[in-house]
Amino acid sequence: MPRLLHTGQVIIDLVMAVDKLPQPGGDVLAQSASFEAGGGFNVMAAAARNGLPVVYLGRHGTGRFGDLAREAMKVEGIRIGIAHKAERDTGLCVAVTDASAERSFISYIGAEGELTTEDLASVPAEAGDYVYVSGYSLLHVGKAQALLDWVLGLPKVINVVFDPGPLVDSPDAPLMQALLPRIDLWTSNSVEALRFTGAADIAEALDRLTDHLPAEVLMVVRDGPQGCWISQRGEREHLPGFKVEAVDSNGAGDAHAGVFLAGLARGLSASEAARRANAAAALAVTRWGPATSPGTAEVDALIRKTFGA
């Protein structure tokens, strides 16, 4: 079976729930607070819980947060590809969710912000594997060029998955221009797709993405509770979402991405994989925390409940 080789960043989230964010200079009391593995861990956990073997091809640190990250990956059965620890600790993200289920982040980058070509060579990619590239990685000067060079050297039998994230807002940066022709699968939410393309709606964003990406690329754009759109070779389809009571949107997009890839790796069509991903994202928003993706059985149960099959 193909594997997911995730080249992004595993960090530790300090997850806090509040009624509302404070005004500048103000203070509020949180209803809960906990340290959880987050960042790229969320996608990997979602994929692993749905049957896709996963390897983390990023650095992990020496210290309290590095220990938490490694333990979380061990629990999920995620293989750590780079054996040695970095000298500095893993980074931290303060993730605050308010009463509307919207989340805000403040991040500090640690060991995961650096990577070399030797690190990436720790686990050779094999035919059919999915190599996951996060837009966050392109912003780290200690990592971006080595990662790009490695990705561009991969044979075409390796599937390159790109998730722009919220900070990559244009196709014009030199690193982005170099990466775009090598992307096989684009996954993002609608806000990211609109910002990246300058489009007014998802349909226009998908059209504009085709101007930048290879002809065969598979595009997935999430649209919150409405589900997602998939597009490939000029054929477009909307897969509706599942009605649930949301309490925390943190990690829902990551659950969607991981479960979608797990479905493709099992041989499902893009439509079937997207329906499963929509179900996983719906279940994820009913739970507090970053890595809240359900496993295969829960996804199956929600689909049976909704569609009767």
Image: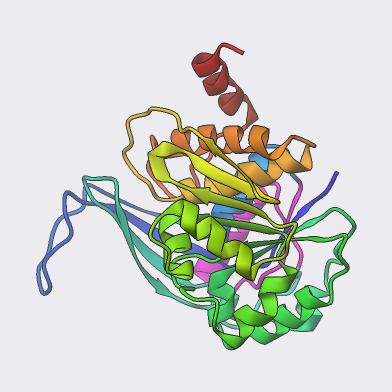
Observer-nearest of 229 and 103: 229
Q: Is residue 143 visible?
A: no
Q: Is residue 297 left or right of residue 160?
A: left
Residue 54 located within the stretch drawn in magenta: yes
Spot occupied by residue 32 in the image (x, y as percentages of width and height): 27, 48
Observer-nearest of 276 and 201: 201
Spot occupied by residue 160 in the image (x, y as percentages of width and height): 73, 62
Q: Is residue 95 above or below residue 267?
A: below
Number of marks = 0
Observer-nearest of 194 and 68: 194
Q: Is residue 236 left or right of residue 104?
A: right
Q: Which quadrant is the C terminus positioned in?
A: top right
Colour theme: rainbow
| Residue in view at x 62 percent, y 24 percent | 297
Q: Is residue 15 visible?
A: yes
Q: Is residue 248 left or right of residue 113?
A: left
Observer-nearest of 84 and 132: 132
| Residue in view at x 43 percent, y 46 percent | 223
Spot occupied by residue 226 in the image (x, y as percentages of width and height): 41, 38
Q: Is residue 89 above or below residue 41?
A: below
Q: Toward which corner of the image does residue 94 lie, by quadrant?
A: bottom left
Spot occupied by residue 213 in the image (x, y as percentages of width and height): 66, 66
Residue 286 located within the stretch drawn in magenta: no
Q: Is residue 302 left or right of residue 269?
A: left
In the image, which residues are magenta? 53-81
| Residue in view at x 56 percent, y 26 percent | 298
| Residue in view at x 49 percent, y 65 percent | 165
The extreme top residue here reads 308
Q: Toward which corner of the image does residue 13 lie, by quadrant?
A: bottom left
